[in-house]
Image: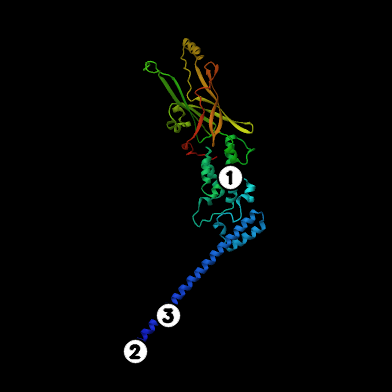
Amino acid sequence: MEDNNGEEEVNHEQVLENFRQEWQTEVQRKQENQTEVAGTSSEKHEKAEKLFLQGIEKEREGRMLEAIKFYRNALQLDPDVEGRLTYTAPEGCSLSSSTEEENCGSEFCDLLQRFSSMSCSSQEHNTFLTQLPSEIINKIFRYVVSSHLDMKSLEALSETCRKFYIYARDETIWRSACEKVWTTHSKKGYSSWRNMFIEKPHVRWDGIYISKVTYYREGDPSVLYAFYEPIQVVEYYRYIRFFHNGKMIVFTTPDPPSQVIHKLTLENQHQLKYRVGYYKTHINHVEKQELAKVTAMVKNVESETLPRSNSGGSRSRTDRHLKKFIVSDIEYHLALDLTSTGKKRSNKLTWQHYSCCSTFGDGRSTMCEMSLREQFPPFYFSPVVSYMLTSSTSV
């Protein structure tokens, strides 16, 4: 009995040992198979990318039939090769000599063509904003631009992704902006509506034009006159803000910009009592250059009102006599040249004409033209972010 028990224990150990060896052999075989499969898959991806790059090279050379063959072979090996492929120039291929860039002639055109042929390779299953229909995205972009023509925000959107870059270059958006500024339906002289909006001079609505006036005058001679001649330094500011509906604000105050710019809205005109009116932009062609001139007419928000006459003969006759000398209305006429300085577009307004027309109670009017030699320095543009924060209408 003892011998039989010993033999059974030996047999069990032998069976366990055989099982261990078979299990290790099977695990090793599976690992080798996985390595072979991974190596084969990697080789297929590399071969597909190589074929796809050769197709790109043939397409640049204008040999479309050969390019299609390379593309077809690459997609048969790896259907996702285009999504994973990094767009770099193959060895021996110079980007500067490519047919695409020679035909395009600009970085913008090259990027637009490249991005239009690319597709998103994201593996996410959620719905992205870029998956919306093109009509809805275009409508969203138009509200981003808004009636204020906030093209800076549109350019910021174009830097988000390739698809937004394409939508931000939509000619219909830029055409609407140009028609709103110049009421023109032609882009003659410009390669695109976007180029026209950037290059052609126009007043800016996304900020305010500021002019700082400083001059000296004689001070009070009774104050320390024995030691020095007193003088006074007078400093004040002029502000001009343009609106998309053709209105403008002109405001003169000693308060610095930090205390004023956020208050210069049409809603505050009765509180601050600044001058409000309308403006027009005129484009003149001089020596193949476009020069802009802004003309405007503004009035005080609250003009002086004539005293109401009481009943009574002598009182009425006195009022009628005084009416001849009371100013009932004042109009201010402005003309300014709009120019650019350095890389900043349409950022300077220079005085060319300034006059006021006073109308009296009896209908007479007088014109007084201001001298622009002194105390009329140019205006310089300063962007104001708060002006573009809210809008209820699209471009």
In the picture of the structure, the residue carrying the numbered disc 1 is 170
For marks 3 and 2, give the CA distance.
23 Å
Badge 2, how many Cα within 10 Å: few under 14, some, many 20+?
few
For marks 3 and 1, give the CA distance.
73 Å
- Outermost left residue: 2
Quarter residue 6 falls in? bottom left
Residue 352: x and y, percent? Answer: 56, 25
Residue 339: x and y, percent? Answer: 56, 32
Label 1 sits on what residue type? Asp
Label 2 sits on what residue type? Asp
In the picture of the structure, the residue carrying the numbered disc 3 is 18
In the image, what residue occupies the spot 61% across and 52% down? Answer: 94
| Location of residue 24 with respect to 2 vertically, above or below | above
Residue 1: x and y, percent? Answer: 33, 90
In the image, what residue occupies the spot 49% across and 11% down? Answer: 317
For marks 1 and 2, give the CA distance.
94 Å
Label 3 sits on what residue type? Asn
Residue nearest the viewer, comparing 273 with 30: 30
Residue nearest the viewer, comparing 245 with 21: 21
Q: Secondary structure at mark 2?
A: helix
In the picture of the structure, the residue carrying the numbered disc 2 is 3
Badge 1, how many Cα within 10 Å: few under 14, some, many 20+?
some
Q: Secondary structure at mark 3?
A: helix
Q: Secondary structure at mark 1?
A: loop
Between circles 3 and 1, the one closer to the viewer is 3
Quadrant housing the C terminus: top right
